[in-house]
Protein backbone atom coordinates (compact mmCIF):
# COMPACT_ATOMS: atom_id res chain seq x y z
CA UNK A 1 0.00 0.00 0.00
CA UNK A 2 1.17 3.54 -0.78
CA UNK A 3 -0.21 6.95 0.19
CA UNK A 4 -1.77 7.24 -3.28
CA UNK A 5 -4.13 4.40 -2.36
CA UNK A 6 -5.85 6.68 0.18
CA UNK A 7 -7.20 9.04 -2.52
CA UNK A 8 -5.48 12.03 -0.94
CA UNK A 9 -5.38 15.20 -3.00
CA UNK A 10 -2.28 16.30 -4.92
CA UNK A 11 -1.31 18.96 -2.38
CA UNK A 12 -1.11 16.42 0.45
CA UNK A 13 0.65 13.77 -1.65
CA UNK A 14 3.30 16.28 -2.70
CA UNK A 15 3.89 17.31 0.92
CA UNK A 16 4.06 13.66 2.00
CA UNK A 17 6.68 12.91 -0.66
CA UNK A 18 8.80 15.94 0.29
CA UNK A 19 8.58 15.00 3.98
CA UNK A 20 10.25 11.69 3.14
CA UNK A 21 7.29 9.43 3.92
CA UNK A 22 7.71 6.44 1.59
CA UNK A 23 5.15 3.87 2.77
CA UNK A 24 2.33 4.22 5.30
CA UNK A 25 2.85 2.60 8.68
CA UNK A 26 0.35 -0.01 9.97
CA UNK A 27 -1.55 2.54 12.08
CA UNK A 28 -1.76 4.86 9.05
CA UNK A 29 -2.96 2.06 6.77
CA UNK A 30 -5.87 1.28 9.09
CA UNK A 31 -6.73 4.72 10.47
CA UNK A 32 -6.66 6.96 7.38
CA UNK A 33 -9.50 5.24 5.43
CA UNK A 34 -11.68 4.97 8.55
CA UNK A 35 -11.21 8.66 9.43
CA UNK A 36 -11.95 9.77 5.86
CA UNK A 37 -15.10 7.63 6.12
CA UNK A 38 -16.26 9.66 9.13
CA UNK A 39 -15.87 6.97 11.81
CA UNK A 40 -15.02 7.64 15.45
CA UNK A 41 -11.58 6.10 16.08
CA UNK A 42 -9.88 4.54 19.09
CA UNK A 43 -6.26 4.18 17.96
CA UNK A 44 -3.62 2.30 19.94
CA UNK A 45 -0.08 2.01 18.61
CA UNK A 46 3.47 2.24 19.88
CA UNK A 47 4.99 5.67 20.12
CA UNK A 48 7.02 6.62 17.07
CA UNK A 49 4.87 4.68 14.59
CA UNK A 50 3.23 7.65 12.87
CA UNK A 51 0.06 8.31 14.89
CA UNK A 52 0.22 12.08 14.25
CA UNK A 53 0.22 11.71 10.47
CA UNK A 54 -2.42 8.98 10.80
CA UNK A 55 -4.95 11.52 12.06
CA UNK A 56 -3.63 14.71 10.41
CA UNK A 57 -3.61 13.50 6.79
CA UNK A 58 -7.26 12.39 6.61
CA UNK A 59 -8.38 15.38 8.67
CA UNK A 60 -6.64 17.83 6.33
CA UNK A 61 -8.12 15.95 3.39
CA UNK A 62 -11.63 16.43 4.80
CA UNK A 63 -11.40 20.18 5.45
CA UNK A 64 -9.33 20.77 2.25
CA UNK A 65 -9.53 24.58 1.99
CA UNK A 66 -9.53 27.56 4.32
CA UNK A 67 -13.09 28.51 5.16
CA UNK A 68 -14.67 30.99 7.56
CA UNK A 69 -13.06 32.57 10.59
CA UNK A 70 -13.51 29.92 13.28
CA UNK A 71 -11.69 26.55 13.62
CA UNK A 72 -13.24 23.33 12.36
CA UNK A 73 -10.70 20.89 13.85
CA UNK A 74 -9.47 20.81 17.45
CA UNK A 75 -6.45 18.72 18.48
CA UNK A 76 -6.06 18.42 22.27
CA UNK A 77 -2.62 17.55 23.65
CA UNK A 78 -1.34 17.21 27.24
CA UNK A 79 1.85 19.32 26.97
CA UNK A 80 3.07 22.39 25.13
CA UNK A 81 6.03 20.44 23.70
CA UNK A 82 3.72 17.93 22.05
CA UNK A 83 1.56 20.83 20.88
CA UNK A 84 4.54 22.40 19.12
CA UNK A 85 5.34 19.05 17.45
CA UNK A 86 1.78 18.52 16.21
CA UNK A 87 1.63 22.08 14.85
CA UNK A 88 4.92 21.57 12.99
CA UNK A 89 3.62 18.32 11.48
CA UNK A 90 0.42 20.05 10.38
CA UNK A 91 2.42 22.83 8.75
CA UNK A 92 4.63 20.31 6.91
CA UNK A 93 1.71 18.20 5.65
CA UNK A 94 -0.45 21.22 4.80
CA UNK A 95 2.27 23.36 3.21
CA UNK A 96 0.62 23.29 -0.25
CA UNK A 97 -2.84 24.11 1.07
CA UNK A 98 -4.18 27.45 2.25
CA UNK A 99 -5.31 25.97 5.59
CA UNK A 100 -4.56 28.05 8.70
CA UNK A 101 -3.06 26.43 11.80
CA UNK A 102 -2.88 27.97 15.29
CA UNK A 103 -1.37 26.60 18.51
CA UNK A 104 -2.70 27.48 21.97
CA UNK A 105 -0.80 26.55 25.14
CA UNK A 106 0.22 27.98 28.49
CA UNK A 107 3.61 29.13 29.73
CA UNK A 108 3.54 32.47 27.92
CA UNK A 109 1.14 35.37 27.51
CA UNK A 110 -1.99 34.77 25.41
CA UNK A 111 -1.78 38.02 23.43
CA UNK A 112 -0.07 36.58 20.33
CA UNK A 113 -2.29 33.50 20.37
CA UNK A 114 -5.43 35.66 20.52
CA UNK A 115 -4.16 37.76 17.59
CA UNK A 116 -3.55 34.58 15.55
CA UNK A 117 -7.08 33.37 16.30
CA UNK A 118 -8.57 36.68 15.23
CA UNK A 119 -6.91 36.33 11.82
CA UNK A 120 -8.89 33.12 11.29
CA UNK A 121 -8.05 29.44 11.72
CA UNK A 122 -9.06 26.05 10.37
CA UNK A 123 -7.21 23.74 12.78
CA UNK A 124 -6.06 24.55 16.30
CA UNK A 125 -3.73 22.55 18.54
CA UNK A 126 -4.31 23.26 22.22
CA UNK A 127 -3.64 22.22 25.78
CA UNK A 128 -6.89 21.99 27.82
CA UNK A 129 -6.09 24.70 30.39
CA UNK A 130 -5.29 27.51 27.94
CA UNK A 131 -8.15 26.45 25.66
CA UNK A 132 -10.75 26.81 28.45
CA UNK A 133 -9.14 30.09 29.55
CA UNK A 134 -9.47 31.70 26.11
CA UNK A 135 -12.96 30.32 25.60
CA UNK A 136 -14.14 31.67 28.97
CA UNK A 137 -12.89 35.15 28.06
CA UNK A 138 -14.67 35.09 24.70
CA UNK A 139 -11.44 35.03 22.67
CA UNK A 140 -12.16 31.62 21.12
CA UNK A 141 -15.28 30.42 19.29
CA UNK A 142 -15.80 26.64 19.03
CA UNK A 143 -19.26 26.42 17.41
CA UNK A 144 -17.84 25.24 14.05
CA UNK A 145 -15.77 22.31 15.38
CA UNK A 146 -16.46 19.21 13.28
CA UNK A 147 -13.57 17.01 14.43
CA UNK A 148 -12.14 16.57 17.94
CA UNK A 149 -8.83 14.72 18.32
CA UNK A 150 -7.36 13.66 21.68
CA UNK A 151 -3.67 12.83 21.34
CA UNK A 152 -2.03 11.00 24.28
CA UNK A 153 -5.34 10.73 26.08
CA UNK A 154 -3.90 8.64 28.93
CA UNK A 155 -1.40 11.37 29.74
CA UNK A 156 -4.13 14.01 29.83
CA UNK A 157 -6.05 11.96 32.37
CA UNK A 158 -2.87 11.36 34.42
CA UNK A 159 -2.22 15.11 34.51
CA UNK A 160 -5.68 15.86 35.90
CA UNK A 161 -7.26 17.38 32.79
CA UNK A 162 -10.48 15.40 33.13
CA UNK A 163 -12.58 18.34 34.49
CA UNK A 164 -11.49 20.59 31.60
CA UNK A 165 -12.16 17.85 29.05
CA UNK A 166 -15.64 17.18 30.47
CA UNK A 167 -16.43 20.89 30.33
CA UNK A 168 -15.13 21.06 26.78
CA UNK A 169 -17.38 18.18 25.69
CA UNK A 170 -20.37 20.19 26.95
CA UNK A 171 -19.26 23.24 24.94
CA UNK A 172 -18.51 21.59 21.58
CA UNK A 173 -21.19 20.81 18.98
CA UNK A 174 -22.65 17.36 19.60
CA UNK A 175 -22.49 16.46 15.91
CA UNK A 176 -18.79 15.87 15.38
CA UNK A 177 -16.21 13.17 14.68
CA UNK A 178 -14.12 12.04 17.65
CA UNK A 179 -10.63 10.54 17.42
CA UNK A 180 -8.67 9.23 20.40
CA UNK A 181 -5.04 8.09 20.05
CA UNK A 182 -2.55 6.76 22.57
CA UNK A 183 0.31 4.30 23.00
CA UNK A 184 -1.07 2.92 26.28
CA UNK A 185 -4.65 2.05 27.18
CA UNK A 186 -5.18 1.78 30.95
CA UNK A 187 -8.61 1.13 32.46
CA UNK A 188 -9.40 4.80 33.09
CA UNK A 189 -8.92 5.59 29.40
CA UNK A 190 -11.13 2.64 28.53
CA UNK A 191 -13.92 4.05 30.74
CA UNK A 192 -13.49 7.56 29.34
CA UNK A 193 -13.54 6.35 25.73
CA UNK A 194 -16.89 4.64 26.36
CA UNK A 195 -18.54 8.00 27.09
CA UNK A 196 -16.48 10.04 24.62
CA UNK A 197 -16.67 7.90 21.46
CA UNK A 198 -19.77 6.71 19.59
CA UNK A 199 -19.50 3.21 18.09
CA UNK A 200 -15.75 3.64 17.54
CA UNK A 201 -13.55 1.62 15.24
CA UNK A 202 -10.82 0.20 17.47
CA UNK A 203 -7.47 0.18 15.67
CA UNK A 204 -4.82 -1.65 17.66
CA UNK A 205 -1.75 -2.43 15.57
CA UNK A 206 0.08 -3.69 18.67
CA UNK A 207 -1.06 -4.51 22.22
CA UNK A 208 -1.25 -1.53 24.57
CA UNK A 209 2.10 -0.50 26.12
CA UNK A 210 4.11 -2.54 23.62
CA UNK A 211 7.55 -1.17 22.78
CA UNK A 212 8.76 -1.03 19.18
CA UNK A 213 11.06 -3.77 17.90
CA UNK A 214 13.65 -1.27 16.71
CA UNK A 215 14.64 -0.36 20.30
CA UNK A 216 17.13 -2.56 22.16
CA UNK A 217 16.54 -2.41 25.92
CA UNK A 218 19.21 -2.85 28.59
CA UNK A 219 19.57 -2.15 32.31
CA UNK A 220 22.40 -1.78 34.85
CA UNK A 221 22.28 -2.31 38.61
CA UNK A 222 23.79 0.80 40.20
CA UNK A 223 23.45 1.00 44.00
CA UNK A 224 23.32 4.78 44.40
CA UNK A 225 23.26 8.21 42.77
CA UNK A 226 27.04 8.70 42.51
CA UNK A 227 27.55 5.28 40.96
CA UNK A 228 24.86 6.16 38.42
CA UNK A 229 26.74 9.39 37.64
CA UNK A 230 29.95 7.45 37.08
CA UNK A 231 28.14 4.99 34.84
CA UNK A 232 26.60 7.84 32.85
CA UNK A 233 30.00 9.47 32.37
CA UNK A 234 31.49 6.15 31.22
CA UNK A 235 28.73 5.47 28.68
CA UNK A 236 28.93 8.98 27.23
CA UNK A 237 32.59 8.41 26.37
CA UNK A 238 31.35 6.11 23.60
CA UNK A 239 30.85 8.10 20.39
CA UNK A 240 28.01 5.79 19.31
CA UNK A 241 25.85 7.71 21.81
CA UNK A 242 25.58 10.52 19.27
CA UNK A 243 22.31 12.10 20.37
CA UNK A 244 21.13 11.18 23.86
CA UNK A 245 18.12 11.97 26.04
CA UNK A 246 18.66 11.41 29.78
CA UNK A 247 15.38 11.10 31.68
CA UNK A 248 15.30 11.81 35.42
CA UNK A 249 12.53 11.80 38.01
CA UNK A 250 12.79 15.33 39.44
CA UNK A 251 13.72 18.87 38.41
CA UNK A 252 16.47 18.90 41.04
CA UNK A 253 18.04 15.77 39.57
CA UNK A 254 17.91 17.34 36.10
CA UNK A 255 19.71 20.47 37.29
CA UNK A 256 22.31 18.52 39.29
CA UNK A 257 23.17 16.22 36.39
CA UNK A 258 23.21 19.15 33.94
CA UNK A 259 25.68 21.10 36.13
CA UNK A 260 27.82 18.03 36.84
CA UNK A 261 28.23 17.13 33.16
CA UNK A 262 28.87 20.79 32.36
CA UNK A 263 31.74 20.91 34.86
CA UNK A 264 33.28 17.53 34.05
CA UNK A 265 32.93 17.35 30.26
CA UNK A 266 32.97 19.42 27.10
CA UNK A 267 29.71 17.95 25.82
CA UNK A 268 26.98 20.25 24.54
CA UNK A 269 24.10 19.84 27.00
CA UNK A 270 20.67 21.34 27.62
CA UNK A 271 18.04 20.63 30.25
CA UNK A 272 14.24 20.80 30.13
CA UNK A 273 11.89 20.69 33.11
CA UNK A 274 8.81 22.46 34.46
CA UNK A 275 10.80 25.26 36.15
CA UNK A 276 12.31 26.35 32.84
CA UNK A 277 10.63 29.19 30.97
CA UNK A 278 8.69 28.40 27.82
CA UNK A 279 11.16 30.08 25.46
CA UNK A 280 14.11 28.36 27.15
CA UNK A 281 12.46 24.96 26.77
CA UNK A 282 11.60 25.49 23.12
CA UNK A 283 15.08 26.83 22.30
CA UNK A 284 16.72 23.85 24.03
CA UNK A 285 14.47 21.50 22.11
CA UNK A 286 15.28 23.17 18.78
CA UNK A 287 19.03 23.07 19.50
CA UNK A 288 18.78 19.35 20.25
CA UNK A 289 16.65 18.73 17.18
CA UNK A 290 19.08 20.56 14.89
CA UNK A 291 22.02 18.48 16.15
CA UNK A 292 23.81 21.37 17.87
CA UNK A 293 23.27 19.69 21.26
CA UNK A 294 24.37 16.13 21.98
CA UNK A 295 22.70 15.54 25.37
CA UNK A 296 19.26 16.59 26.58
CA UNK A 297 18.53 16.08 30.30
CA UNK A 298 14.83 16.26 31.08
CA UNK A 299 11.98 15.11 33.27
CA UNK A 300 8.89 13.27 32.06
CA UNK A 301 7.43 16.62 30.98
CA UNK A 302 9.11 15.88 27.62
CA UNK A 303 8.64 12.12 27.39
CA UNK A 304 5.85 12.60 24.84
CA UNK A 305 6.78 15.83 23.11
CA UNK A 306 10.03 14.93 21.39
CA UNK A 307 9.60 13.65 17.85
CA UNK A 308 13.13 13.38 16.47
CA UNK A 309 14.08 10.46 14.26
CA UNK A 310 17.82 10.54 15.01
CA UNK A 311 17.88 10.04 18.81
CA UNK A 312 20.42 7.23 19.18
CA UNK A 313 19.98 6.48 22.90
CA UNK A 314 17.56 7.06 25.75
CA UNK A 315 19.02 6.73 29.25
CA UNK A 316 16.66 6.33 32.18
CA UNK A 317 18.74 7.64 35.07
CA UNK A 318 16.05 6.19 37.32
CA UNK A 319 13.17 3.77 36.82
CA UNK A 320 9.84 5.59 36.38
CA UNK A 321 7.23 4.66 38.98
CA UNK A 322 4.44 5.38 36.50
CA UNK A 323 5.16 2.36 34.38
CA UNK A 324 3.51 3.64 31.18
CA UNK A 325 6.05 6.49 31.23
CA UNK A 326 8.77 3.93 30.52
CA UNK A 327 7.09 3.12 27.20
CA UNK A 328 6.92 6.79 26.28
CA UNK A 329 10.47 7.53 27.43
CA UNK A 330 12.10 4.85 25.32
CA UNK A 331 9.77 5.73 22.45
CA UNK A 332 11.89 8.84 21.87
CA UNK A 333 14.43 6.57 20.13
CA UNK A 334 13.90 3.96 17.42
CA UNK A 335 11.45 6.23 15.60
CA UNK A 336 10.53 6.00 11.93
CA UNK A 337 11.87 2.42 11.74
CA UNK A 338 15.39 3.50 12.77
CA UNK A 339 17.41 1.54 15.34
CA UNK A 340 17.68 2.86 18.88
CA UNK A 341 18.84 1.83 22.34
CA UNK A 342 17.42 2.39 25.81
CA UNK A 343 19.52 1.99 28.97
CA UNK A 344 18.02 2.03 32.46
CA UNK A 345 19.89 2.53 35.75
CA UNK A 346 18.34 0.97 38.85
CA UNK A 347 19.20 0.93 42.53
CA UNK A 348 17.94 -1.90 44.84
CA UNK A 349 14.62 -0.15 45.47
CA UNK A 350 13.99 0.31 41.74
CA UNK A 351 14.42 -3.34 40.77
CA UNK A 352 10.83 -4.00 41.83
CA UNK A 353 9.56 -1.29 39.45
CA UNK A 354 11.60 -2.71 36.56
CA UNK A 355 10.00 -6.12 37.13
CA UNK A 356 6.56 -4.52 36.91
CA UNK A 357 7.58 -2.71 33.72
CA UNK A 358 8.68 -6.04 32.21
CA UNK A 359 5.24 -7.42 33.03
CA UNK A 360 3.59 -4.38 31.42
CA UNK A 361 5.57 -4.55 28.17
CA UNK A 362 5.52 -8.36 28.16
CA UNK A 363 9.24 -8.85 27.67
CA UNK A 364 12.47 -9.20 29.64
CA UNK A 365 14.98 -6.35 29.77
CA UNK A 366 18.59 -7.53 29.56
CA UNK A 367 20.53 -6.64 32.74
CA UNK A 368 24.23 -6.04 32.00
CA UNK A 369 27.08 -6.19 34.52
CA UNK A 370 28.58 -2.87 35.53
CA UNK A 371 31.66 -2.07 33.42
CA UNK A 372 34.86 -2.58 35.45
CA UNK A 373 35.85 1.05 34.77
CA UNK A 374 32.87 2.29 36.80
CA UNK A 375 33.75 2.90 40.45
CA UNK A 376 31.04 1.75 42.86
CA UNK A 377 30.82 4.33 45.62
CA UNK A 378 29.58 3.76 49.15
CA UNK A 379 25.93 4.66 49.55
CA UNK A 380 25.49 7.70 51.86
CA UNK A 381 23.41 7.12 54.99
CA UNK A 382 20.61 9.46 53.90
CA UNK A 383 20.29 7.86 50.48
CA UNK A 384 20.46 4.38 52.00
CA UNK A 385 17.66 5.34 54.39
CA UNK A 386 15.53 6.47 51.45
CA UNK A 387 16.18 3.18 49.63
CA UNK A 388 15.32 1.17 52.75
CA UNK A 389 12.19 3.24 53.25
CA UNK A 390 11.06 2.47 49.70
CA UNK A 391 11.83 -1.23 50.12
CA UNK A 392 9.89 -1.19 53.39
CA UNK A 393 6.86 0.30 51.66
CA UNK A 394 6.98 -2.41 48.98
CA UNK A 395 7.35 -5.21 51.57
CA UNK A 396 4.59 -3.77 53.73
CA UNK A 397 2.30 -3.68 50.73
CA UNK A 398 2.87 -7.41 50.38
CA UNK A 399 2.80 -8.07 54.17
CA UNK A 400 0.87 -5.52 56.29
CA UNK A 401 2.45 -6.89 59.50
CA UNK A 402 5.99 -6.08 58.31
CA UNK A 403 7.67 -3.49 60.56
CA UNK A 404 10.53 -2.57 58.28
CA UNK A 405 14.23 -1.83 58.35
CA UNK A 406 13.52 1.89 58.30
CA UNK A 407 12.64 1.65 61.98
CA UNK A 408 16.22 0.66 62.81
CA UNK A 409 18.60 3.08 64.49
CA UNK A 410 21.03 5.12 62.37
CA UNK A 411 24.07 3.26 63.73
CA UNK A 412 22.49 -0.03 62.63
CA UNK A 413 21.84 1.29 59.11
CA UNK A 414 25.41 2.56 58.85
CA UNK A 415 26.80 -0.75 60.09
CA UNK A 416 24.79 -2.70 57.53
CA UNK A 417 25.90 -0.32 54.77
CA UNK A 418 29.53 -0.98 55.75
CA UNK A 419 28.95 -4.72 55.63
CA UNK A 420 29.27 -5.24 59.38
CA UNK A 421 27.26 -7.83 61.22
CA UNK A 422 24.57 -6.43 63.49
CA UNK A 423 23.50 -8.51 66.47
CA UNK A 424 20.43 -7.47 68.40
CA UNK A 425 20.04 -8.97 71.86
CA UNK A 426 16.81 -8.89 73.76
CA UNK A 427 16.92 -6.92 76.99
CA UNK A 428 16.58 -8.99 80.16
CA UNK A 429 13.36 -8.50 82.06
CA UNK A 430 13.76 -8.30 85.85
CA UNK A 431 10.80 -9.02 88.05
CA UNK A 432 10.49 -6.63 90.93
CA UNK A 433 9.97 -8.18 94.38
CA UNK A 434 6.86 -7.25 96.21
CA UNK A 435 8.06 -4.90 98.97
CA UNK A 436 5.24 -6.13 101.16
Image (spheres, rainbow, N blue to C red):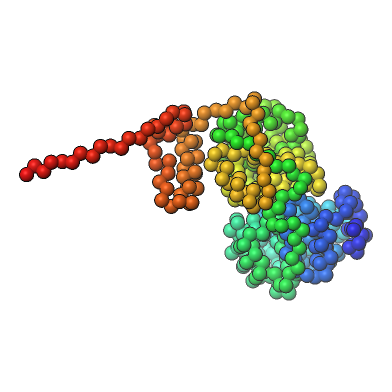
Q: With respect to residue 216, does 17 lie above or below?
A: below
Instruction: Looking at the picture, tell me which residue is in the foreground, 141 or 396.
Output: 396
x and y percentages locating residue 377 in the rendered image: 55, 28
Tell which of 379 and 164 is nearer to you: 379
Which quarter of the rendered picture does the C terminus lie within?
A: top left
Say whether residue 205 is left or right of residue 226: right
- Tell whether 433 sits left or right of 246: left
In the rendered structure, the answer to whether residue 33 lies left or right of residue 278 reads right
Can I make out residue 104 in this image?
no
Is 290 on the left-hand or right-hand side of 387? right
- Considering depth in this image, is 241 or 264 the residue closer to the camera? 241
What residue is drawn where x is 42% and y is 30%? 421
From the viewer's perspective, is residue 288 above or below residue 99? above
Q: Position of residue 115 (x, y in %)?
A: 73, 57
Residue 124 picture quarter: bottom right
- Asked whether residue 42 appears in the rendered view, the answer is yes
Report the label total: 0
Of 56 and 372, which appears nearest the observer? 372
Q: Residue furthest left?
A: 436
**Image point (79%, 42%), residue name:** 339
Which residue: 90% across, 58% down?
Answer: 1
Q: Quadrant of residue 136?
A: bottom right
x, y percentage for residue 93?
Answer: 84, 55
Write the residue at 81% across / 62% down: 30
Q: Tell which residue pokes out farthest to the bottom in this image.
A: 175
- Residue 2, horizontal then vertical, whole percent: 90, 57
Amino acid sequence: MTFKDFDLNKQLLQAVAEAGYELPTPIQQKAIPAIIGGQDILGIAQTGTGKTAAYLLPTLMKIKFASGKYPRVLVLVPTRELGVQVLENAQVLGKYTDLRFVSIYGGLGPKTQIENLQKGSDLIVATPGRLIELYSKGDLVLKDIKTLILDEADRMLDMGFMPQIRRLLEILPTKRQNLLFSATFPEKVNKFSAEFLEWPVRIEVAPSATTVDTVEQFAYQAPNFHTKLGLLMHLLENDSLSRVIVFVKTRQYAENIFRYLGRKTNYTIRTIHANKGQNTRLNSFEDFKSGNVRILVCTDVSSRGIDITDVSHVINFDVPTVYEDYVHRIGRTGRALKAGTSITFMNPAEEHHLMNIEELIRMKITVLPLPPEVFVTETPIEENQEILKTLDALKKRADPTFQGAFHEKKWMIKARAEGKKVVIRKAKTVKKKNKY
